[in-house]
Image (cartoon, grey):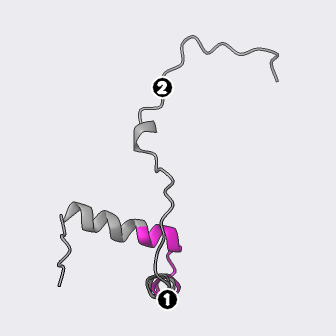
Amino acid sequence: MKKEYDFSKSIRNPYARRLKKQLTLKVDDDVIAYFKQTAQETGIPLPTLINLYLHECATQKKRLTFA
């Protein structure tokens, strides 16, 4: 391993702006149970499953209906 490396010709990661951000949410127990069950059935990790669902909602511009 070198003592020093030359980064003068390096470039920024063009995908860095697309990286995921951490967010803390408070979610009801029944919602967690639903997503845990779905994650277990599909084999998709829980955080990935929730992210996929929220991404779908955002891309389809789904709106909540309030009763």
Residue 50 - label: none
Percent position of residue 60, x then y: 18, 65
Horizontal side of 26 relative to 64 (left or right) equals right
Percent position of residue 37, x then y: 49, 89
Instruction: Please report the residue visible at 51 percent of the width from the left and 83 percent of the height from the top.
Output: 36
| Residue 63 lies in quadrant | bottom left
- What quarter of the picture does the N terminus occupy? top right
Pointer 1 or 2: first along the chain: 2
The stretch of residues the image draws in magenta is 37-50
The residue to which callout 1 is attached is 37
For the residue marked with disc 2, what is the amino acid? Answer: Arg
Q: Provide the secondary structure element on which disc 2 rests.
A: loop
For the residue marked with disc 1, what is the amino acid? Answer: Gln
Position of residue 45 relative to residue 17, above or below, is below
| Residue 18 lies in quadrant | top left
Distance from the alpha carbon under mark 1 to that under mark 2: 40 Å
Instruction: Please report the residue visible at 46 percent of the width from the left and 75 percent of the height from the top.
Output: 27
Q: Please name the predominant secondary structure of the magenta segment in the image.
A: helix
Q: Using the image as rendered, state which of residue 65 and residue 3 is in the foreground.
A: 65
Q: Provide the secondary structure element on which disc 1 rests.
A: helix
Label 2: few (<14), some (14–19) or many (≥20) C-alpha neighbours in 10 Å: few
Instruction: Please report the residue visible at 45 percent of the width from the left and 86 percent of the height from the top.
Output: 38
| Residue 31 lies in quadrant | bottom left
Instruction: Please report the residue visible at 53 percent of the width from the left and 86 percent of the height from the top.
Output: 40
The residue to which callout 2 is attached is 12
Label 1: few (<14), some (14–19) or many (≥20) C-alpha neighbours in 10 Å: few
- What quarter of the picture does the C terminus occupy? bottom left
